Image: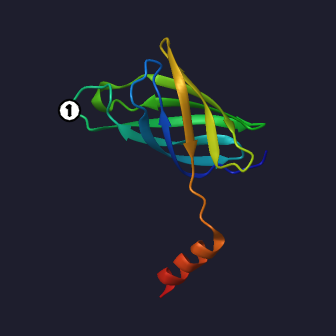
Amino acid sequence: MTNDLTGVWFGEYGYPLGEAPVTFIASIDDRGGLLTGRTDEPNTFAMPGAARLFAHVQGACRDGIVSLTKTYDGTGGAIHSVAYTGELSADGNMIAGIWRTRGWSGRFSMSRPVVPAAEFDEALETVDE
């Protein structure tokens, strides 16, 4: 698969005990299959003074398998890493799989919006006016 994963992704991850899923936004830069970026999510587990948590991500996409390590940047006291492994959809716009950290694991999914060419062209025309 030769999809470029660069872009903004919207996702969620779930816990094994049935808690509500946590939504996140990821900004990914794909350089020949090597992935870097950042995530932003609501604080659901760290110290209560932080409304949101941020992390750096790095990883790779090979043969349709995406492997990412998300390392929290210390906001709210969160500094651990989480390993994500998922399968990229055939159209390159969705990743679904499993996350793992410190004896915990659960499912995740993330997708990026697809903007039809006509809407994109219309938006560009509006900007040019």
Q: Please, which residue is most extreme toward the bottom here?
A: 129
What residue is shown at x 32% (from left), y 33% (from top)? 43
Residue 114, how many percent across, how many down?
A: 60, 59
Which is nearer the eye, 78 or 1? 1
* Rendered location of residue 15, percent (x, y): 45, 23
Above-or-below relation of 94 to 77: below
Tell whether 47 sits left or right of 66: left
User: How does the figure colour the protein chain or chains?
Assistant: rainbow
Residue at position x 56%, y 56% in the image: 113
Q: Is residue 108 left or right of residue 46?
A: right
Image point (47%, 88%), residue name: 129
| Residue 102, image x, y percentages | 47, 13
Badge 1 amino acid: Gly
Provide residue 69's location: percent of width, then percent of height: 55, 29
Tell me the residue at 72%/50% (across/down): 91
Q: Secondary structure at mark 1?
A: loop
Q: Which residue is mark 1?
A: 49
Q: Is residue 45 left or right of residue 6?
A: left
Q: Nearer the viewer, residue 57 or 116?
A: 116
